Image (cartoon, rainbow, N blue to C red):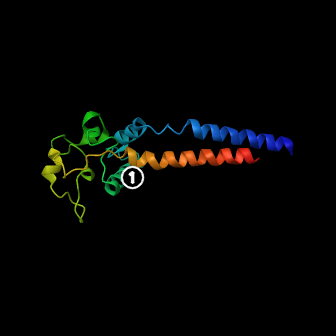
């Protein structure tokens, strides 16, 4: 019994330390790389990229944000989206535009030109990282509490 408890204690301690030390592993660079490589990737052979596009579209639509750090992500970095869309017609995805009830941009030209009020100028990183970091701390403290209790 004591050996089983020591093994359990070691695993709980390892998971607690891992949760505490990896809480900052969700950096903007990680999300930026994933978004730039997978969003509207032109190769249909990899169906998981369609999931990436749908996820980012939903995230940008629900939270009224654009990209990871802002709309400039789409212009400053080489991306799958940039390879298939010209900068003049699509400086950023349509989901970055302020949309009406039907899901259409309220002013497409204003959005393309970057006129404030017609596109979402804030990035999505804070929306993503806030809850994830909060839950990571919760898991770490829960593991630590169990560790102290056993």
Q: Position of residue 58 (x, y in %)?
A: 35, 55
Q: Is residue 27 left or right of residue 43?
A: right
Q: Is residue 65 above or below residue 73?
A: below
Which residue does the image show at 53% across and 49% down from the upper left? 135
Query: Which quadrant holds residue 129?
Result: top left
Q: Which residue occupies the extreme bottom position in the image? A: 101
Comparing 44 with 145, the one in front is: 145
The furthest residue to the left: 109
Q: Where is residue 27 in the image (x, y as percent from the top left)?
A: 44, 37
- Residue 92, horizontal then vertical, whole percent: 24, 45
**Residue at figure coordinates x 13%, y 50% from the top left:** 109
| Residue 38, above or below 62 | above
Q: Name the residue under label 1.
A: 55
Quadrant hosting residue 30 = top left
Please tell me whether mark 1 sits on a helix, a strand or a loop.
helix
Answer above or below: position of 110 versus 21. below
């Amino acid at each position: 019994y004591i050996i089983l408890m020591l093994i359990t204690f070691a695993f709980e301690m390892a998971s607690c330390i891992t949760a505490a030390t990896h809480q900052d592993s969700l950096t903007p660079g990680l999300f930026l790389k994933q978004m730039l490589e997978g969003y509207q990737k032109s190769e249909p052979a990899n169906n998981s990229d369609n999931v990436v596009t749908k996820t980012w579209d939903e995230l940008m639509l629900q939270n009224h944000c654009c990209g990871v750090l802002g709309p400039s992500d789409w212009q400053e970095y080489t991306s799958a989206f940039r390879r298939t869309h010209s900068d003049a017609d699509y400086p950023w995805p349509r989901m970055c535009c302020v949309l009406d009830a039907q899901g259409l941009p309220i002013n497409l030209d204003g959005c393309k030109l970057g006129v404030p009020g017609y596109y979402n100028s804030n990035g999505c990183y804070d929306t993503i990282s806030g809850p994830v970091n909060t839950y990571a701390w919760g898991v770490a403290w829960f593991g630590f509490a169990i560790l102290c209790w056993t």
